[in-house]
Every structure is written in structure tokens, then in C-alpha cells.
Amino acid sequence: MRRAFTGRRAAVAVVVPLLFVAACGGSDDNSSGGGGGDQSDAGPYKLGLVYSSEGPFANNSATARAGANYAVELINADGGVNGRDLELVEVDARNDPQSLVTAIPKLVSEDGVFAIIAPADSAGCEIACAAAAQLEVPAISPGAGRPGVLEPSRPWSFTLAQPDAANSIPVLSAVVKQEGIKTAAIIYDEANATTKAQNDLYTKVFEDTGVEVVSTTTYTSGDPSFTSQVTSMAAETPDVIALAAGPADAARIAVEVRTQNLDSLLMGTGSLQSGGTEYLNGAGDAAEGTITAAQFNPDNPDQPAADLLAQAREDNDFDVVPLNFSYAFDIVNMIANYLGDNEVEATEDSLADDRQGLLDYLQGETLEGMSGDVKFAEDGTGDRPQLYAVVTDGKFVIQEVDS
């Protein structure tokens, strides 16, 4: 089944057919748009939101947090769900694994959350989603893309992102052939599970396309200088430098590459595009020409995505809506749709059955949201389009892969 959804800001409504019909109220008598009775005396529906203000993917986390809050704001302004507000119970894990381990049980047992918006980064999602699965609470990430990240926590966990390997390997392989690349260098943080997986991804791409890897260099996330690493790569004059890095580190690497006058093509996985403007702002002119895999089109012309994106740009003063913002927005709306469609009470007596119901709903539905068609593969990962982006005039410009 395919549904369309969004919340509406009272002053500036987006007019799209079937906008959030099932979940939002918005009528004068505060009744449910989904036909259910007014449950306002039951208090708000609580959703956990786990993010990290520190670490290599802090910017991705911040944009996801903003997207979730934006969705809640719109839904509540439109009457909530079944006459009840949504409430985000937020936890800043600060990129600390132990904080994730202790935060999830607290969200469930003390705060009584119905479901959890899991960390946007793969390392954080793997820990948080596994903890949520032990408690049989649905957890959905707006960005985790490392292959196998959900395996310890299925079937209770999902991610709207397609795994980096499934998305990036075919896309980047096509780009390598298109650009006639013969030699490559890879730079990655060997202490970070996500960037280590990206290194494996690039290695696969170059093996499959017959590209010679002439340099493999490591760094530590947050390094203020990449002079020695870039000097080492420069000695091999590679056609492409593959960035296995979070947006901030990738930006500093790009600046050093151009400072040393290397004209190597810079390449990133989909996570670089998903970081939004952090890479672009940090690298400035050095980012021009960077090619990344992509799975989200911020200029999607299809409805309802086009109107949702336009409204998000206006309401949030965005030049471009970031991927993690869009994915988190869609997660909140998916949960709200389920609550409204099924007149869910989410009381202490019904909570276990209601969470199982959400699990079944997420696995079977196709929804149309800000990020386009939203559906999950059997392993809980996002089923996304295969695109790539080229940084042009300071923006990620989406292109389709040649078939």
C-alpha cells in the first residue's frame, strides 16, 4: 500500500492530495483525521530521539534531529494524532558507546517511549538498535548505511538509508568507468568502524573496475592537519582520491589536496552527500568537482516530495534540504501514520502489541514522503534510488547513473 504524508504549518499550508490524512487531526473539534476518537486525556505519544553532538558524523546527527523536530512541530500544529501531541524525548550520547547502552533502557522503562529514532551514524545505530531490540522496541535510523549494521537488532530495527555498499559500489563503479580512472588513493580512519567499511567499499570498487590502488593512507578523526597524508598520496599522482571520512574530516583533506596543487578527482560515498553543507562549507572551492554516490534528490520533482521539500526550505531557511533532515522527517510521519491509522492508544497494557503492530506496518508499507518513495527491504534497510552527485558551484548536483 502506498501513502502520502506530511504535517502542515497553520499559517503556510502545503497543498498535496492525501496529506497526512490518516494521522493528523486539525479539525475544530480536535478529532482524529484517521477517524479514531479523541484520546487527548491520555497525554502525548512519546518518541525517543538519540543523537550525538560529537564525533565525525555530528553534523549528520544534528540535521536528523532538526528534521524530526520539524515534523513534530508540524504535526502538533495540525492537531496532533488522535487528538494527542507527539513528544520527542531526546538523548545526546556525545559519540560515547556506553551512553548509548544506558540511554535506551532509560528511554523505554523511565520515559515510556513508543519507538526510537535511532542515531544517524552506523556506529551509534548498531549499539542503540541492538539495545532497543533486546527490549522489543522499534528503532529507525535516518542514516545508518554500513553493511550489516542492523543484523544484531533485526527485526526490531530499520534504516531509511540504503547500505553504502549496495548504493555506492554500483554507482561509483559506473563513475570510475565514465571518468576513465586508472589509479586511486584511499584515505580512511582505521579506528572508526564506518570509515573502515568505506575503505573496504572503495577497495571493492577499484578491484571490480581494474583500477590500481597506488596509496592507502590512514588518519585519526579530528586531525587538524592532513599534510603528511596528502604528501604521501601526492607522490603517487593518483587519478582519484577516495575519501573514507566524515564531512568535516573530508573537507580538511580536500583543502590540503588543493593546497598541494593535486588535480586528482575527489570521491565520496553517499554519506558525504548526506552530511549536507558541512563538507561544502568546510572545503569551499576545494570541494568543486567532488563526486559522491547519492540516494536522495533534494530537488525531487515528484509529488508530494517536491512540495514538502519546498516548504522545508522556506520554513528552515535552507538552500538545500539535507538527506538526514528529510529521512528523520519521514520517520516521524511514518510512525504518526501508524498511530492514526490504527487509533493506537500506546498505554501500558497495549504497548507491547502496539509496538509489534508498528513493526509489521513498517515492513509492509510504501509511503511517499519528503525523501521520495519510502519502503524497506526484507533486511530493514531503505530501498533507495541509485544516483550520484557532483559538487558544482558549491552544491551537490544530482545525476542519474548511465544504464
Image: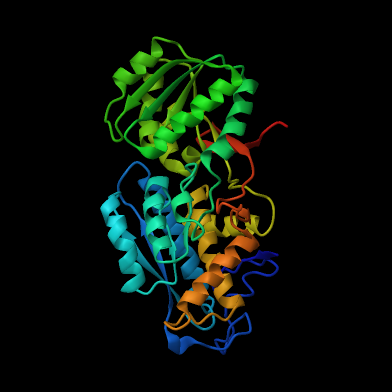
**Residue appearing at x 29%, y 31% in the figure:** 220
Q: Quadrant of the N terminus?
A: bottom right
Image coordinates for residue 311, horizontal then vertical, percent: 57, 60
Q: Looking at this view, is 55 or 303 the one in front?
A: 55
The quadrant of the picture occupied by the C terminus is: top right
Pinpoint residue 142: horizontal percent, then vertical percent. 48, 53
Q: Residue 345: where, in percent of width, then height?
A: 50, 82
Depicted 203 relative to depicted 195: above or below: above
| Vertical relation: 73 (above or below) 270 | below
Indicate whether 49 appears above or below 75.
above
Q: What's the colour scheme?
A: rainbow
The reply to whether residue 237 is visible in this rendering is yes
Q: Nearer the viewer, residue 227 or 135?
A: 135
Residue at the right extreme? Answer: 403
- Examine the rendered structure and indicate whether residue 101 appears above or below residue 272: below
Q: Which residue: 62% across, 38% down?
A: 387
- In-image side of 345 versus 19 (left or right): left
Q: Position of residue 339 (x, y in %)?
A: 55, 75
Q: Quadrant of residue 219?
A: top left
Is there any visible trace of residue 318 in the rendered image?
Answer: no
